[in-house]
Image: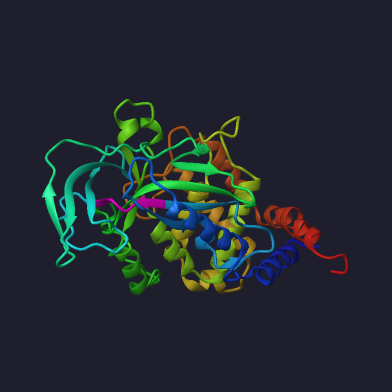
């Protein structure tokens, strides 16, 4: 069988088996139950504080349901009803959504020396007026910074900013991430909404939705700063999970399928420069997500749909990632001066492996590692 025929088989198989996800899929239901658990859980030493959860990650991003499971865990972010972040120099809000308490601490987002990583300095105390439901602000004059680890408990293993929990009878584990809500689009990504886009993705309505949803700030320090006595406890990272959910759900089905294929490949063929399976030198799902977001913005629709060949698309995207690594540049999709490639990556080795991936190799890989696994799930008469 020639290579083009195998590429055609892989393409048709993925297109025919990646259906629209049922509204009440197993992971979606489990996530809703877990969010309800988080929302009703008491907060230690803070009786009047509520936890506001949000499902993120693959459960929220994918509207397709591949034949092979594509959800490895369930990601839930949560913020406190008594905390809020605002960009530096931004006026304190006078009105807040109903989810916030009548007493709110407002933290100003200040830059660190590393793009995408920030500190949260307490600037205002908001108190809601009973008469008109507006908030009055009192400026806080002490040099007080929020600690990024103050809400962590010994409830499970830590993975970056997430607490990993296994809760029977749920089949999947949960990654629970504490964050501080920011209702305003951050100044660190100020150029994202207005930058020039040749192919009108995302469109203006989607851009408006993204900007109006603001962002979050999650409690984790940069790898270089985690051992630093002061920065290690006070550094936060900007999170654009809300924006990513909106953007990925606006993709065409073929783009979601390609994203799924690249994630499967990365999970089963880890392109890492370290001898062990540690974080150092390892490409992550976030690199693939970033690659896809840029491709959806920079490629015309015909590139995705004309003479449709999923293997070709995946190979070209992996080669683009190889070029980025050769240049030691993986540009953050939202923060223009943030680079997602670090000095501890074995760039030459990873780039070489990506460059060596051909359509022939990748199509055979999906036949052997994806389609054959799917066939094991079928009844004997199929």
Q: Main secondary structure of the magenta part?
A: strand
Name the quadrant containing residue 93: bottom left
- Decide if residue 147 is in sight here: yes
Residue at far right of view? 381
Q: Quadrant of the C terminus?
A: bottom right
Question: Does 276 lie within the magenta span?
Answer: no
Rendered image coloring scheme: rainbow
Question: Could you say where residue 304 lies in the image, as x and y percent from the top left?
Answer: 54, 69
- Decide if residue 291 is in sight here: no
The mark tally for this picture is: 0
Vertical position of residue 141 compared to residue 59: above or below? above
Q: Quadrant of the N terminus?
A: bottom right
Magenta residues (range): 78-86
Q: Residue at x 57, y 62 (%)?
A: 29
**Which of the two residues, 310 or 27, is positioned nearer the viewer here?**
27
Q: Horizontally, is 368 left or right of 23 in the view?
A: right
Name the quadrant containing residue 110: top left
Name the quadrant containing residue 257: bottom right
Q: Residue at x 39, y 61 (%)?
A: 243
Q: Residue at x 44, y 50 (%)?
A: 41
Vertical position of residue 219 compared to residue 253: above or below? above
Question: Could you say where residue 182 lies in the image, as x and y percent from the top left?
Answer: 29, 55
Q: Residue at x 43, y 37 (%)?
A: 342
**Which of the two residues, 149 or 56, is positioned nearer the viewer here?**
149
Question: Could you say where residue 126 lies in the image, as x and y percent from the top left?
Answer: 18, 53
Q: Horizontally, is 239 left or right of 368 in the view?
A: left
**Which of the two residues, 262 or 85, is positioned nearer the viewer here?**
85
């Amino acid at each position: 069988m020639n290579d083009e025929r195998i590429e055609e088989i892989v393409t048709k198989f993925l297109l025919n088996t990646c259906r629209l996800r049922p509204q009440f899929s197993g992971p979606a239901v489990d996530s809703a139950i877990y969010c309800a658990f988080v929302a009703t859980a008491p907060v230690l030493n803070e009786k009047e504080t509520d936890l506001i959860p949000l499902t993120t990650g693959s459960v929220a991003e994918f509207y397709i349901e591949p034949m092979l499971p594509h959800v490895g865990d369930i990601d839930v972010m949560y913020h406190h009803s008594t905390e809020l972040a605002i960009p530096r120099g931004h006026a304190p809000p006078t009105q807040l959504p109903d989810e916030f308490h009548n007493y709110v601490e407002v933290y100003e987002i200040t830059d660190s020396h590393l793009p995408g990583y920030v500190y949260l300095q307490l600037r205002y105390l908001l108190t809601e007026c009973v008469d008109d439901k507006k908030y009055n602000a009192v400026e806080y004059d002490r040099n007080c910074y929020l600690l990024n680890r103050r809400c962590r408990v010994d409830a499970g293993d830590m993975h970056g900013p997430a607490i990993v929990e296994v809760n029977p009878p749920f089949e999947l584990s949960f990654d629970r991430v504490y964050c501080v809500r920011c209702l305003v689009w951050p100044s660190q990504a100020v150029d994202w909404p207005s930058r020039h886009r040749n192919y009108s993705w995302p469109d203006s309505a989607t851009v408006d939705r993204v900007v109006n949803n603001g962002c979050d700030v999650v409690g984790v320090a940069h790898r270089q700063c985690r051992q630093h006595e002061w920065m290690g406890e006070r550094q936060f990272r900007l999170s654009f999970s809300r924006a990513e959910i909106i953007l990925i759900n606006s993709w065409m089905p073929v783009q979601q399928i390609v994203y799924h294929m690249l994630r499967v490949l990365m999970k089963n063929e880890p392109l890492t420069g370290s001898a062990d399976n540690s974080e150092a030198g390892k490409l992550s799902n976030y690199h693939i997500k970033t690659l896809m977001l840029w491709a959806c913005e920079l490629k015309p629709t015909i590139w995705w749909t004309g003479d449709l060949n999923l293997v070709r698309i995946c190979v070209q995207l992996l080669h683009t990632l190889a070029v980025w690594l050769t240049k030691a540049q993986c540009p953050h999709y939202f923060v223009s001066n943030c680079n997602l490639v670090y000095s501890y990556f074995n760039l030459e080795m990873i780039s070489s492996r990506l460059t060596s991936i051909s359509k022939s190799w990748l199509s055979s890989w999906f036949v052997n590692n994806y389609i054959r696994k799917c066939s094991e799930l079928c009844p004997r008469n199929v």
